[in-house]
Amino acid sequence: METPILNTIDQPADLKKLDLTQLTQLATEIRQVLLNKVSQTGGHVGPNLGAVELTIAFHTIFNSPTDKVVWDVSHQSYTHKILTGRKQAWLDPKHFEDVSGYTAPEESPHDYFNIGHTSTSIALATGMASARDLQGKSGNVMAVIGDGSLSGGLALEGLNIAATLKSNLIILVNDNGMAIAEDHGGMYQGLKELRETNGQSSHNLFKAMGLDYRYVADGNDMQSMLDAFKAVKDIDHPIVLHVQTEKGHGYQPAIDHKEAFHWHVPFDLKTGKTLHPVTGETYNDVIHAELEKEITEDKTPITAITAAIPGSYDLKRFGRKHPDRYFDVGIAEQESITFAAGQAQQGMRPIVFHSGTFLQRAYDQLSHDLGINKLPVTIMVSGGSISAGDPTHQGIFDIAMLSNIPGLTYLAPTTKEELTAMMHWALHQNIGPVAIRVPSNDVHSAVLNDFDAHKMNILHAGKKVAILGLGSLLPLAEEVQQQLNKENLDVTVIDPRDISELDDETLSNLEKDHQLVVTLEEASLSGGFGEKVSRFYGDTDMHVLNFGAAKRFNDRETTAELWHEFKLTPEQIVAEIKAAL
């Protein structure tokens, strides 16, 4: 792969020596190295391909880091990183893991925040601009936000405050007509009209909020972006620069399949096909089977709601069959929960499909709108696992968050049969909201006899030691049991089921012939399930060991490293149990 222009670029200042032809060639080279890496490692494909020209143009016209740019979500910042001294992380496979997939201040003075979630950039930029003014400093402040991210409430709050500033602030709306999937919401008709009228439509959200406005029809044309940035550099008031780009620009599979290539696992660069496709039954299949049963057999008035992540649950499968019962509210977690609360109050049975790491944005709604009002909304929570990735996408805090909201029941199935039973129970109870932690491991199956959502399931009754394997860690509990069995220790194995409320009767009965209770959870120990169990036995002679994750933001450790550090291997747990006896 030849990159003669990129080879000369080590810092943004190097771009200022290049002419238009060289800058355009640089864009081609950067696309090549972007695709070469993400096809091997996985990553955000479409967002980065679409933002190459605007990124090169920014660093050519502006003077980073004196002039500051905040990338919303920052999943489109790969080109920015390449141009700010980190290109080896794309050129050399030995360095592929050197940098985060998002902006990271510890990596570079050109990054200002660890950002991996949506709709924050404008609010951050307003704060930075006001701080600049208060300190008598100079320099431009720019927020780069995608049209999809505008549906997040914080983005609109940021626009509202931006309009009150009396100094330099540039808000670049990178409009490719997409969120992760397609956009949803009333504002997008207005954005569509602006695109179709070259920015002249009277339906202009930004002007209505009191902001200056300019439009760029082709954000993937280098000269257009250079001219646009020259025109707004050092402007003395807030302005929105509305730029139309193409998600996936320069790579046909990413253009043809924009949602699939928003973030993609490793793929064949020539064909775009996934290198290691998932085969066999998934928990999504189990969920969809129960949805169909509820509608067709039980006639349950269910609805399915997502906040812009339909692909995580393959929800468009449901939407195609039942379009009147499928709702994508856009990147608006708060709206998804309160929207569901309104439906439930009127007799519907809504199911909201979420990722645990995004659901935190709706914490107030979970507590105020669902918990206090005791509304029977079901919430499916995915991504509950110990993994490395980056500090913004951690799946270990959902238990502490959800299990401590009064009136909200949080359940952890261990098999597809339990998942089905829990969904059915949640959709037909009238106690209040129920969240279900979708297992993060492969599909497990086991005969389910009697089912009580609040009753712990004793899978094997032994003595002396009881191991409570929560959700996806039940198989680990069974592995530990098998190893201890070889050492003539017949231990009890329990599936807790209910994360939020303890089964006091079962725990009390263990005191009769057990001296050690062990809890395993794929979540933060602080505020987690194990702490509840430890507190239950606090004034008794029962010894309790809790295994789970440390309360911290992990960053690019391997999953295997984390599991070993947290002593979540069978051998480590066995050793700890033997030492405690």
Image (spheres, rainbow, N blue to C red):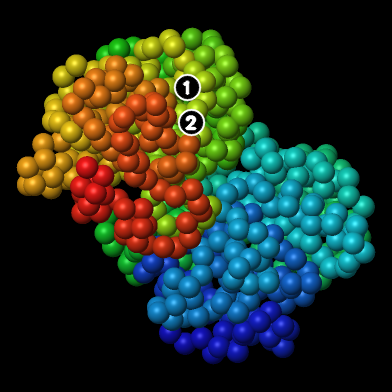
* Image spot of residue 275 (x, y percent): 28, 62
Compared to 132, does 579 lie above or below? Answer: above
What's under tag 1, amino acid-wise?
Answer: Leu
The answer to the question of whether label 2 and label 1 lie on touching residues, with beta carbons closer than 8 A, is: yes
Q: Is mark 2 on a helix, strand or loop?
A: helix
**Residue sitting at x 36%, y 58%:** 565
Q: Residue 402 carries which label?
A: 2
- Quarter in which the C terminus is drawn: top left
Residue 50: name its quadrant: bottom right
- Circle 2 packing at 10 Å, graded few (<14), some (14-19), many (20+), is many
Q: Is mark 1 on a helix, strand or loop?
A: loop
What's under tag 2, amino acid-wise?
Answer: Leu
Q: Name the residue under label 1.
A: 408
Q: Which of 491 and 212 is in front in this view?
A: 491
Compared to 293, does 153 lie above or below? Answer: below
**Residue sitting at x 84%, y 57%:** 131
